[in-house]
Amino acid sequence: METAIEASKNALANHSVAVRLPASLPPVPMDAVRIREVLSQLLDNAVKYCPPGTPIVISSEVSNRHLVTSVADRGPGIDSFEQALIFDKFYRGRDQRYRVPGTGMGLAICKAIVEAHGGTLGVTSQLGSGSVFHFSLPLSQERARVQ
């Protein structure tokens, strides 16, 4: 987690970042470089879509034999229609595509990485209240082989 925050350090300069982790987390089999890419992308998106000075919160918890990591922001939120589309290749939010730089590939790549680990990637969001992007990784070897 620290390496992802460090990699996004310049982008995060105008935001406070709170990391909320339990005292101990179980080991999780993963390709650490790829999962760092996922976390960095989620942090970069939070910075792109929320106003300077707003906090970003990273948290992890164990739920149903998975480690669930979340990145929460206080941006404009994502309407329910777009929540189903934002993980598609090249999709850019209809209100953001001309204001925010990017190709629309970041979340699609994150989804592919997380799914290759046997996990899931999702979002919970309300317009005007921000978004929480979360991904889960299985705690045991009962997962897809990472290539």
Image (cartoon, rainbow, N blue to C red):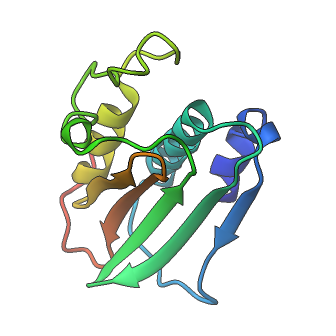
Q: Position of residue 56 (x, y in %)?
A: 64, 54
Q: Nearer the viewer, residue 132 or 28?
A: 132
Q: Nearer the viewer, residue 143 or 25?
A: 25
Quadrant where the C terminus is found in the figure: top left
Going 24% across and 50% down the picture, which residue do you hit?
116
Residue sticking out furthest to the top = 98
Q: Nearer the viewer, residue 140 or 119?
A: 119
Q: How many numbered circles does the render carry?
A: 0
Quadrant where the N terminus is found in the figure: bottom right
Q: Quadrant of residue 94?
A: top left
**In the image, is 67 to the left or to the right of 146?**
right
In the displayed structure, 84 sits above or below 68; it is: above
Going 59% across and 88% down the picture, which residue do you hit?
24
Residue sticking out furthest to the front = 128
**In the image, is 23 to the left or to the right of 26?**
right
**In the image, is 145 to the left or to the right of 74?**
left
Q: Position of residue 59 (x, y in %)?
A: 55, 69
Residue sticking out furthest to the bottom = 23
Q: Position of residue 31 (x, y in %)?
A: 42, 54
Going 28% across and 84% down the picture, which residue do you hit?
65
Residue sticking out furthest to the right = 13
In the displayed structure, 105 sits above or below 29; it is: above
Q: Position of residue 29 (x, y in %)?
A: 38, 68
Q: Quadrant of residue 49?
A: top right
Going 31% across and 51% down the picture, which residue do you hit?
114
